[in-house]
Amino acid sequence: MFVKNAWYNAGWDYMFTQSQKNGLSQEKGALVARKIAGERVVLYRKPTGQLVVLEDRCPHRQAALSLGQKEGDGIRCLYHGMRFGADGKCNEIPGQETIPERACVRVFPVVEKDNWVWVWMGDPAKADEKLIPHAVGPSDPDWNVKTSQMHVKANYRLEIANLADLTHLAWIHRDTLGAPDLTTRDRYTHIKPKFTMLSHAMRTEYYVRSVPINSFLSHLFPPGMLFDLEFDIMHTLPCTWVLHFRAFVADGKDEGAPTGQLVADTWTSQAVTPCDEDEVDYYYSWGASKVCEFAGLSQLLCDNLDDAFTEDRHVLEAQHVRMKEKPNFPMVDIIHDAGPGKMLWLLDKHLKGEAKEAATVTA
Ligand code: FES
Ligand SMILES: [Fe+2]
């Protein structure tokens, strides 16, 4: 089940190229197929550069329009050559004069922001750009941000739960984002997150005090040096997760905001897009402020996310298989389920709201 009236991420802006060639050959990225929240869509750029998103399904015999040809502002189906404009309306049927009124393709609202491409999967009249989460993209002049992506064969609710509880850094990610020694891992699991619930999002703030720097950065600092780590996360429906992560030289205190020297100031922006109930596309970035960056840090951050999300992928894909095998298995709750519970509650609230609205319309 998916919330319809929401912005879903379709990837980074550079994945969609503007160029087109004559004939059947096209440059990679000219027509991009995506499956978002159960719907197949095709994305392309008009000659002006403006993005268009249409249902990837020809109204004639359901051929994939993404296999066709971009023509000016529109697209031509590869199978029998029907041509559609960016407004979704058919404007040519080879060998036929009249065009049936129903010969049109669904059009989805699309917005580019912070180098991300957002598609509205619900009622176009309700598409509100203010609901697009804040992120820090690679073109932000103050930050040096690198991007990447991954495909995961798991239900997106598992990703939501994974991102809403970072105590798993101590376990899944002990060799990457976390730390290998037991004392540090203990500190990662004894955090006291502050949750703030908003209409479409949950903010989570906490510190991990007096710990070695994350495993993947440990070669950059003297052994034994301790840090205070600050996490400030905005987790927005359906599953966009943006973290402002800062590391300070440890000030020796256990309470309050860190007061030591700031050694790393970073943003990571992550969007998990459900393709369907069994798979997600994950688009993410990580980068450091140009004020405290040194050569190679941002690439190191982003490369580390590739490693860390591969660790998550192994766990979540195996979990997904088991959840499907025994959907009614009596699971036990623990203290770290607070964040996942709140975020999934928010998702369910929106799902129920939309279901109720749909029932009222049909009644
Ligand atoms: S299926 Fe597209 S034109 Fe026939
Ligand atoms: Fe993780």
Image (cartoon, rainbow, N blue to C red):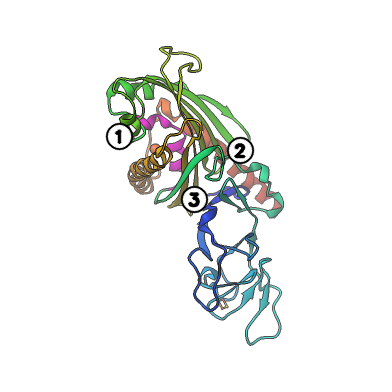
Residue 126 appears left or right of 112: right
Range shown magenta = 155-172
Secondary structure found at label 3: strand
Residue identified by numbered label 1: 175
Q: For the residue marked with disc 3, what is the amino acid? A: Pro
Q: Position of residue 163 (x, y in %)?
A: 45, 37
One can see residue 261 in this view: yes
Q: For the residue marked with disc 2, what is the amino acid? A: His
Q: Main secondary structure of the magenta part?
A: helix
Residue 59, picture quadrant: bottom right
Residue identified by numbered label 3: 274
Marks 3 and 2, Cα distance to the nearest angstrom? 17 Å
Please report whichever mark, 3 or 2, sits nearer to the chain's N-terminal start. Answer: 2
Secondary structure found at label 2: loop
* Image position of 202 with respect to 187: above or below: below
Residue identified by numbered label 2: 200
